Amino acid sequence: MKKQLDLLYYVVFSIYCVIYWICETSLILLYPDAIYSCYKFIRVICVIVLFIKVLLEGLSLSQYVASLLLFVMLLMSTIQSGSWNLLLMLVFVLASSHINFNRLAKIMLVVSASITALAVVLSILGYIPLVYIHTESYVYRGAYGFSHPNQLSLCVLSMCIALAVLRFRHFGILDTVFCIACDVLIIVFPKSRTEALCLLFVVVISIVCTLDKEQKRNRLLLSIGCGIVLMSQMISIYLMKNYDSGKNWMYQINKIVSGRIDLANHFYLSYPVKPFGYNYSEISDVWYKGWQGFVVDNAFCHTYLEEGYLVEYVLFALIIVLFLKCIYLNKLTQSMYCLLLFTPVFFCEGTVLYISVNIGLVALNYLLDGTWETQKTGVSISQEKRHIV
């Protein structure tokens, strides 16, 4: 039964990732109703299937209570905001006990690489729209089969992080060359500076982790990740609430991150801010400086505004607690390594809390049931060892 349930997990995860990234391609411009209908159907199926998996595998009373509280909180957020993404993230996390993280990374690598290749080729051949946008300085950026240049860059970034996870502690010269080549392509074609910097961070951390043969720098690496999340969260929320373009230091930060702070501040001041979020899709006239719709490419601000400030505080508190717990245990698993590589992305992408983008989020399951994902060795931390935490 366990093998069948695990296989089912991999299947629904694969299907969900595929439909999510299809929604981010320019194919959505040609068949919006059909693709969104398919996406809505698949996410409902994912919730049902994974919920059944959790019930069949069983949890202790305390685990059920904690899981139920999180589920109710995100369900209320989903009802109020209309966004299913964090609820889906939670059920994937809850159902991830003893899953093989290596297989998840392989699925992410195959899906992101395939979607990127197909989207780029089909857009160049003219089968799907090739979207271009221009910055305030009239620099043209190509999305090459995606709905926005940043989505192309994020898909490539997810692919490279999946590769780095598969090469955990064995990141070699060829891996480095491949990731640097992808970094150059991101700079030259979609011209996504922030994603390019994040990919450079991935390369540096992967090399350091590989050179650390005796694993003496686990706590240092985890501390870097924890520090990035904590500082980014405080800076993002502060700037979102207090941004003033007349202050040069704020203006310069906003310029470096391509206007992300200004956009977040606009939505913070212009629309209601609620504990369980706000449904921006119900507003037809969401326009600001040429942007249509809810556009906040910062995970902290995006979650705070759309899914709710209570949800934002709880989720990022859990992530910080997870890092602190791993620092105490000196435990750097594949999933924590993946989460570490995604930490700078929180500052420049609003979708990094989606499981279809960041598979490292399954590490949160450790806070609920005390077990890590199955590693390359096929061994997971047993339930009996939880008393040492």
Image (spheres, rainbow, N blue to C red):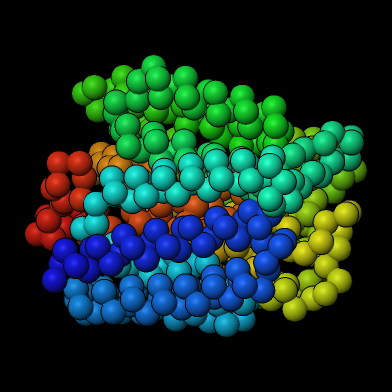
Note whether residue 36 is visible. Answer: yes
- In front here: 219 or 339? 339
Residue 318 figure quarter:
bottom left
Residue 314: percent from left, percent from top = 48, 65
224 to 322, vertically: above or below: above
Residue 73: percent from left, percent from top = 48, 77
- In front here: 88 or 71? 88
Q: Would residue 123 be found to the left or right of residue 91 on screen?
A: right
In this view, the residue farthest toward the left is 384
Residue 183: percent from left, percent from top = 58, 28
- In front here: 164 or 201? 164
89 to 166, vertically: above or below: below
233 to 218, vertically: above or below: below
Residue 78 figure quarter:
bottom right
- In front here: 306 or 287? 287
Residue at (63, 76) in percent of width and height: 81
Residue at (74, 35) in percent of width and height: 256
Residue at (45, 69) in percent of width and height: 88
Residue at (42, 28) in percent of width and height: 205
Residue 267: percent from left, percent from top = 78, 63
